[in-house]
Image (spheres, rainbow, N blue to C red):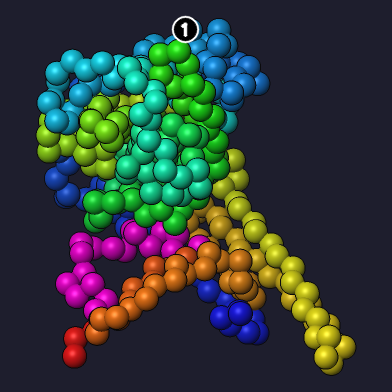
Amino acid sequence: MPRGRGTLFAIWTAGMMLPALATGSVAVPVRTAAVATVLRAPDGTITLDGALDEPAWQRAPVLTLTQQDPHPGQPTPYITAVRVLRDGTHLYFGVECTDPDQAKLAMHSLERDSDQKHDDHVTIVLDTLDTHHLGYVFQVNAGGARTDGLMSPASSDPNYDWDGIWDAKVRRTATGWIAEIAIDVRSLQIRKGADVWGLNIQRYVPREQLSLLWTGISLDASIFNLTRTGLLEGVGDFQQGRGLEVTPYALVRHDSAGNRSAGQVGGDVRYNLTPGITATLTFNPDFAEAEADTDQINLTRFSLFFPEKRRFFSEGANIFTFGAGLVDNYTFI
């Protein structure tokens, strides 16, 4: 059932504080020395199939992940090699995961944006503005399920309401599995001419509770800590395009009892004013297509919490999240 009728105009400006935070007096930790250079492949030469058999993949430098938890820096049979490529519009990651016992690979869900914390999976974090204040998270499990979200310093976990434009294919091999990932950079906020992005990569093996990272391998490190990312070089001439996204809709209702029909049109428009400021306009919104709330049975005296699922209100909301709430939306009686 629609949550509003008539015409509604609303403007939501997300990320307005990013430029100020990036240039203000906020102390920035010393950056790790890990550096990767992305190799450019000719446009149209990379086929997303999980094989990594194109010549460009063989020429790309190899990034090796190191055990971070439980024994930082120690050797492990779960060898993980990562290669990075790009063309004019996409950034590609090829992740080769050695596994001595593939029969024990964990894959609990193949749904988009499913919780992968108990799955064998790889995670890529990109800080495209290199400010430590906005990170894009891309996760792929051993079954090919994709999860993505946004990171900010105010939260220890990503906001998974964001959906980017990207794809991934997974293939089993004789020694493990391979994840091939293609990210359309036109769906990301980037600074024109900036040749360096923040990057970190993680592989997680749940049956061993084993975490491997590209950079930041101390026990207190986290893949979601944007201040611990390494450097990805060679991304300076990516073009973001117009930075304009239009999502129209049309809806027809028919009342069979009264033999009446009515139509409704509307849509959402997003426009990147600057790399740190995005304006969103919604016209005559209808949120019937929003994901339904999960059924919950409440036998306590506390109120239930239902997360916001409507993209217009959830996208960019993490920018304005400051720490954890003190009452967790509970009602005290």
Q: Is residue 29 shown left or right of residue 134?
A: left
Looking at the image, is 122 positioned above or below residue 8? above
Label 1, on which residue? 59
Q: Which residue is drawn at 44% across and 71% down?
A: 295
Q: Which residue lies furthest to the right in this view?
A: 259
Q: Residue at x 24, y 56 (%)?
A: 154
- Residue 6 included in the magenta stretch of the image: no
Q: Which amino acid does label 1 sit on?
A: Arg
Looking at the image, is 61 positioned above or below residue 209? above
Q: Nearer the viewer, residue 44 or 292?
A: 292
Q: Can residue 277 be seen in this view?
A: no
Label 1 residue SS: helix
* Segment tinted magenta in the rendering: 310-330
Quick one: quadrant of the C terminus?
bottom left
Q: Is residue 6 shown left or right of residue 131?
A: right
Q: Residue at x 29, y 48 (%)?
A: 133
Q: Is residue 239 shown left or right of residue 214?
A: right
- Residue 327 included in the magenta stretch of the image: yes
